[in-house]
Amino acid sequence: MLEYDTFCYLENQKTGSTFVITFLNEFSAEPLRNHKKHAAVEVRDPDKFYFINVREPLASYRSLFAFGLEGNGTVFARFDQLGYGHLYKNGAQGFSEWLRFVLDRRNAQALAGGYTLQQASAMGLMTWRFMRLAIFRFEQLGMGNPTMPAIRQHVQQHFFMNAVIRQESLRRSLAVLVRGPLASRLTDPQAAIQWLKAAPRINASTARVSDEEAPLDEPTLSLLFQKERYMYANFYPDAPGYADWKARKTTGAKVAP
């Protein structure tokens, strides 16, 4: 979380946040009042402009797994400590097995301390990572034993992001904000636009696990869509395979690929 006088940026992991932070450090006209890495907002200001990044869930999982193959990341460290390091031993070919493990609600605590069994029953890790930042006081739901309807109601009532930027169109989406709600909050909007056009990728991981290296079978892909349905429905309805999965789920009929 980077908090300024009149706006706040929420750092969603592995979604291009380092690029946005570098941009804000370069062009913000307001002093940085508070910076807590990947932290949620504790006090919501209704007059402040809040924005956050998202990334297509399957791409996020592939990136997270590839990061672990290099021995990096908090998820890899937790898995290694808890005795699940074998999930990385087959390299890219082990992605499907790893993903099924990650999407299994019983393994929630192996992924993150605040990710509860009840939350994992309703959503996957990528949805949870987003919601804990974009939904005010979302983590407090984990302190009790909320029902799924209660989780859904909380999400509907307490979503407070003014803008959500897709990682896949990061520069273009930031440029829209520069020309709009961020214009008066930057030192030089025109220079900011030029910077967005010319700046190299920042802190981009070299690790990759491609579709060709690690294709998913239909049951695993369906489980992914089920657990991350909030992210797909709201931000990635055009993702390959999602429309067919949604049609099958709605009608109960098998839809040809």
Image (cartoon, helix red, strand yellow):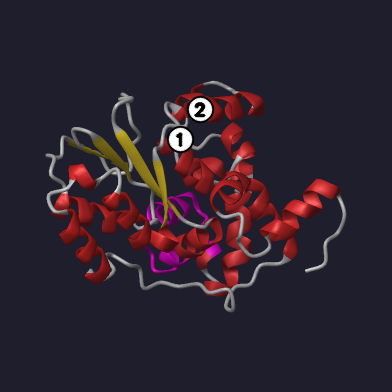
Mark 2 secondary-structure assignment: helix
Closest to the observer: 142 or 167?
Answer: 167
Q: Amino acid at mark 2?
A: Gly
Q: Where's residue 172, x and y in %?
A: 36, 61
Question: Which range is magenta?
Answer: 66-87
Q: Where's residue 105, x and y in %?
A: 62, 42
Spatial separation of the CA atoms under disc 2 and disc 1:
7 Å
Q: Amino acid at mark 1?
A: Gly
Residue 212 inside the magenta-drawn segment: no
Task: Residue at 41%, 64% (x, y): give it.
Answer: 67
On screen, residue 129 above or below 119: below
Q: Is the C-beta separation of discs 2 and 1 under 8 Å? A: yes
Task: Residue at 23%, 61% (x, y): give it.
Answer: 193
In the image, farthest residue toward the right: 253
Estimate how packed mark 2 is, as few (under 14), some (14 to 19) or many (20 or more) residues with alpha carbons within 10 Å.
Answer: some
Closest to the observer: 38 or 32?
Answer: 32
Closest to the observer: 73 or 167?
Answer: 167
Q: Quadrant of residue 134?
A: top left
Q: Where's residue 255, x and y in %?
A: 83, 62
Closest to the observer: 244 or 91?
Answer: 244
- Pick whichever of labels 2 and 1 is earlier in the sequence: 1
Q: Quadrant of residue 18?
A: bottom left
Kindly report the secondary structure that dominates the magenta region of the rendered protein.
helix
Q: Which label was assigned to residue 142?
A: 2
Q: Which residue is mark 1?
A: 114
User: Is 216 left or right of 10, judged from the image as shown?
Assistant: right
Estimate how packed mark 1 is, as few (under 14), some (14 to 19) or many (20 or more) residues with alpha carbons within 10 Å.
Answer: some
Q: Quadrant of residue 30?
A: top left
In the image, farthest residue toward the bottom: 212
Task: Residue at 65%, 53% (x, y): give it.
Answer: 225
Task: Residue at 74%, 63% (x, y): give it.
Answer: 218
